[in-house]
């Protein structure tokens, strides 16, 4: 249908051109999009490139601070598009083609699924899967790696984070505000439920079944429930499994194809076991699971722990309706939780994430649904200062006519509406945070503080850190960029800190070899640091290994790129020039964190208080510094990204112990 309309538009344009004197036609506005019949690249954000030619200067010891530009009204509108270079007839045909293309989208948005699956949608909307493509850290890292590999990396990273975007031939590097709505949703509904064959471990290299909302989806048990719903219109209303403009009813998918693979660990392994193009094992979550007691002895699946009742525990599944058709729920059945929390957390504006149709209005007319409930565009939300209290009564009652707000937030009613939306967003984010803490606190265990010596020589104590799950190592997945460490502190009776290990420098980094403050001699190396972060170790072409923040072998030659191996790497399981120094805990493993406090630190009055915390973060700040030259989406500076990453650190467990004053100490 779309192709026919577009062909009609072209024919009409030719007819108009033949009837008028020859003239040079102006170029199209460029507002095109991909359809089911063909893929046209979407317009990219100007100025957003793999690496800007004017990269921000970054001092080795410090992260750049926000530029704090003067406020400006950046609201994007379609006024320019309203003045068309084509005549009204051709413009109408093109607009109809766009509308038809949205209704019959190849990859429908999760918002379309929300109509019948509101609970599933809400869980997914705040999940790590839903955040995958929005993450400013991921996008900057992908761009930086592409730059360091001179473009040879291609879509290797992003194809897991937005499979729909890559299927639509979107540019690899572009602002999320300009992406297709479904592309922006990352690992959205169709990414799992439009897969109809087992692709195996391929680092996200799989094919999605294209089609509009009526296209059959893949499900674990087939379409018996859907057939039952279709057979009872008196209860569930009129449903349209096929396009039918003459029928007033609810659009539903035309069937459910049984796909048992959805319930198996192998389905997760398609993306969660990542081999770089040169054979480097970047992520091993699925491989670790296959060799774990949970898989070999208990015959559990990834879904049992990550989609069950209690995050991180094989606690069974909830029972409830799979769909709410109109106001009628379907009969109860096994109900999986689609929140699937992990160590990642959002650092973007809460008006943008979690996904919420009431919050975001599509900026480009071609992407707007027939009824757009969104309050503001992404770029408009970035102007809303929720931290200043906009939209709260305590703030608004002090606003005067002389106070300036950027459009559209100069309307107080809209600020109140935005605050109502944000209150719901914050509530959902808190719920996800509770589930994330439950997951991480289950995976990591901290034993009691054991004192080995407390005498005239000082204090010696230790604490046991254990893997609390038998399904994989902790941390797992992208373990080289997971921050899990022990902070040990000793206070005297006056509350003065006498000893600390596991503290952060001014950037937010641990005092390890990747800290720029340690590198510059501004802070001492934390030699007693207990960290579970894996390290990348690479070597240059002339020999010599060193730890790297990014797993790209450094080169003494110009134009570096990840060179294909000249010999088989299957024997080693890794390329010759790069490896990982794993420090994770495998299932059943534990490791002591040992600490020595010299007597010179314990010269104050007792008793002494020992506090030990096990802390988990998303990524190290040194990664933010490493990728900052690529630029961050959503107008974020490196300093803002780093601060929000550190603000998300969680204390998973804490142990305390009080030591009475040792009479031998003076």
Image (cartoon, rainbow, N blue to C red):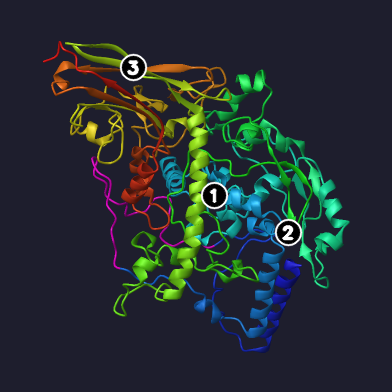
| Neighbours of disc 1 within 10 Å: few (<14), some (14-19), many (20+) | many
Q: Nearer the viewer, mark 3 or mark 1?
A: 3
Residue at screen point 58% across, 25% down? 471
Q: Secondary structure at mark 3?
A: strand
Q: Give how far across and how far down residue 215 sits, in percent.
A: 77, 55
Residue 501 is labelled as: none
| Neighbours of disc 2 within 10 Å: few (<14), some (14-19), many (20+) | many
Image position of 609 (left or right of 567): left
Q: Nearer the viewer, residue 87 or 626?
A: 626
> The C terminus lies in which quarter of the figure?
top left
Q: Which residue is mark 2?
A: 212
Q: Nearer the viewer, residue 160 or 405?
A: 405
Q: Which residues are magenta?
A: 43-70
Q: Give how far across and how far down residue 610 sits, in percent.
A: 28, 24
Whole-angstrom CA distance, mark 3 to mark 1, is 38 Å
| Neighbours of disc 3 within 10 Å: few (<14), some (14-19), many (20+) | some
Image position of 524 (left or right of 112): left
- Give the quarter of the image for residue 259: top right
Q: Which residue is mark 3?
A: 462
Mostly what secondary structure, the magenta segment? loop
Q: Nearer the viewer, mark 1 or mark 2?
A: 1
Image position of 518 (left or right of 570): left
Q: Secondary structure at mark 2?
A: loop
Q: Nearer the viewer, residue 569 or 428?
A: 428
> The N terminus lies in which quarter of the figure?
bottom right
- Give the quarter of the image for residue 393: bottom left
Residue 126 is labelled as: 1
How many labels, in total? 3
Q: Give how far across and how far down residue 498 sits, in percent.
A: 19, 26
Q: Earlier in the sequence, mark 1 or mark 2?
A: 1
Q: Give how far across and how far down residue 560 sits, in percent.
A: 40, 37
Q: Earlier in the sequence, mark 2 or mark 3?
A: 2
């Amino acid at each position: 249908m779309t192709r026919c309309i577009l062909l009609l538009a072209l024919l009409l344009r030719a007819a108009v051109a033949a009837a008028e004197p020859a003239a040079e036609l102006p170029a199209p506005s460029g507002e095109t999009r991909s359809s089911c019949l063909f893929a046209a690249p979407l317009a990219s954000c100007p100025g957003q490139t793999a690496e800007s030619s004017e990269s921000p200067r970054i001092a080795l010891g410090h992260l750049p601070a926000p530029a704090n530009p003067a406020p400006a009204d950046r609201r994007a509108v379609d006024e320019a598009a309203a003045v068309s270079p084509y005549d009204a007839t051709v413009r109408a045909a093109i607009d109809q083609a766009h509308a038809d293309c949205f209704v019959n989208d190849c990859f429908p948005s999760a918002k379309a699924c929300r109509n019948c699956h509101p609970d599933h949608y809400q869980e997914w909307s705040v999940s790590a899967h839903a955040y995958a493509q929005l993450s400013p850290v991921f996008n900057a890292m992908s761009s930086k790696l592409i730059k360091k590999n001179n473009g040879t990396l291609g879509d290797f990273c992003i194809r897991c984070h937005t499979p729909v975007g890559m299927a639509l031939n979107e540019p690899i590097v572009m602002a999320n505000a300009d992406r297709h709505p479904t592309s922006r949703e990352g690992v959205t509904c169709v990414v799992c439920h439009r897969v109809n064959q087992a692709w195996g471990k391929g680092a996200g290299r799989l094919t999605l079944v294209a089609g509009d909302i009526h296209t059959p989806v893949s499900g674990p048990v087939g379409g018996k429930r859907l057939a039952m719903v279709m057979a009872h219109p008196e209860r569930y209303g009129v449903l349209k499994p096929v396009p039918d403009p003459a029928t007033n009813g609810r659009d539903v998918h035309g069937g459910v194809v049984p796909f048992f693979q959805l319930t198996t660990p192998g389905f997760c392994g398609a993306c969660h076991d990542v081999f770089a193009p040169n054979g480097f094992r970047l992520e091993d979550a699925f491989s670790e699971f296959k060799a774990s007691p949970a898989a070999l002895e208990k015959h559990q699946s990834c879904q049992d722990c990550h989609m069950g009742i209690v995050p991180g525990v094989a606690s069974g599944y909830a029972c409830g309706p799979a769909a709410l058709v109109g106001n009628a729920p379907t009969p109860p059945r096994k109900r999986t939780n689609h929140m699937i929390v992990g160590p990642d957390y959002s650092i973007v504006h809460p008006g943008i994430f979690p996904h919420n149709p009431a919050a975001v209005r599509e900026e480009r007319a071609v992407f707007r649904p027939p009824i757009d409930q969104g309050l503001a565009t992404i770029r408009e939300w970035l102007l809303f200062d929720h931290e200043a209290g906009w939209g709260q009564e305590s703030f608004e009652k002090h606003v005067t006519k002389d106070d300036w707000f950027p459009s559209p937030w100069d309307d107080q009613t809209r600020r109140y509406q935005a605050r109502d939306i944000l209150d719901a967003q914050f509530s959902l984010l808190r719920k996800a945070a509770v589930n994330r803490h439950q997951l991480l606190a289950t995976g990591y265990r901290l034993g009691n503080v054991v004192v080995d010596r407390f005498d005239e020589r000082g204090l010696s104590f230790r604490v046991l850190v254990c893997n609390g799950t038998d399904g994989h190592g902790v941390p797992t997945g992208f373990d080289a960029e997971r921050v899990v460490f022990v902070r040990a502190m000793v206070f005297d009776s006056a509350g003065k800190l006498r000893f600390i290990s596991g503290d952060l420098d001014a950037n937010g980094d641990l005092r390890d070899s990747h800290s720029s403050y340690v590198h510059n001699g501004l802070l001492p190396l934390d030699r007693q640091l207990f960290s579970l972060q894996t390290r990348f170790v690479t070597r240059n072409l002339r020999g010599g290994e060193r730890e790297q923040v990014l797993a790209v072998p450094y080169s003494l030659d110009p134009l570096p790129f990840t060179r294909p191996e000249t010999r088989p790497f299957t024997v080693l399981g890794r390329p010759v020039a790069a490896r990982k120094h794993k420090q994770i805990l495998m299932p059943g493993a534990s490791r002591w964190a040992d600490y020595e406090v010299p007597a010179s630190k314990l010269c104050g009055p007792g008793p002494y208080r020992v506090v030990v915390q096990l802390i988990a973060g998303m990524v190290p700040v040194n990664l933010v510094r490493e990728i900052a030259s690529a630029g961050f989406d959503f107008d974020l500076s490196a300093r803002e990204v780093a601060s929000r990453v550190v603000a998300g650190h969680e204390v998973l467990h804490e142990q305390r112990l009080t030591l009475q004053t040792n009479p031998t100490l003076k």
